[in-house]
Amino acid sequence: MRLAHNSVVVVADGRKMLFFRNEGDAEYPNLTVEDQDYHPNPRTGEQATDQAGRASNTIGGRASSVEPTDFHQIEEDRFAAQTVALLNKKALAGDYEQLIIVAPAQTLGEMRKHYHKETEKRLKGEIAKDLTGHPVDQIEKIIVEQE
């Protein structure tokens, strides 16, 4: 995938967001970090204090268990929505012309729910990979190798 000069690349997952700008050109990208955010998100067992409950049906006298709330996933989804809110704000301000988003498939799915039309217009591509722990030079290489 070719990255025009001044393109924006966002690498995110449910806990970390890296906002890059391409200071290089389409042939030789040079991603520099403009913004980043990290949101610690402990597993659900560390966030919840109670076990899932049971519900009883007064008709028939049956009891069934209640699905436990996945607080960890709720926080990851909220963080993905916050990341898109930043992208929407920057798109509406005309801060970037082209955007590439790199995130795990589940995070991408959540992010898509929140794209503004201006963000969608600027979206050049999405890559369903978790690259938040990779060095910048590897991120550049992986993006360039995408078709």
Image: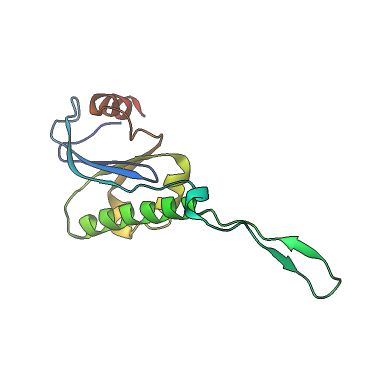
- Determine the residue positioned at 48% across, 46% down: 43
Assign the C terminus to one quadrant of the image: top left
Assign the N terminus to one quadrant of the image: top left
- Determine the residue positioned at 13% across, 35% down: 23
Task: Name above or below for residue 131 compared with residue 36.
Answer: above
Q: Position of residue 95 (x, y in %)?
A: 16, 52
Q: Position of residue 144 (x, y in %)?
A: 29, 27
Q: Is residue 68 left or right of residue 128?
A: right
- Residue 78 versus residue 105: which sits nearer the camera? 78
Residue sitting at the far right: 60
Q: Position of residue 63 (x, y in %)?
A: 78, 64
Q: Is residue 16 left or right of residue 26?
A: right
Q: Residue 57 appears in which quarter of the rendering? A: bottom right
Q: Is residue 28 left or right of residue 79?
A: left
Task: Name above or below for residue 108 compared with residue 131.
Answer: below
- Determine the residue positioned at 64% across, 57% down: 67
Q: Position of residue 85 (x, y in %)?
A: 30, 58
Residue sitting at the far left: 23
Q: How many marks?
A: 0
Colour scheme shown = rainbow
- Residue 22 versus residue 97: which sits nearer the camera? 22
- Determine the residue positioned at 17% across, 56% down: 94
Task: Name above or below for residue 21 compared with residue 66.
Answer: above
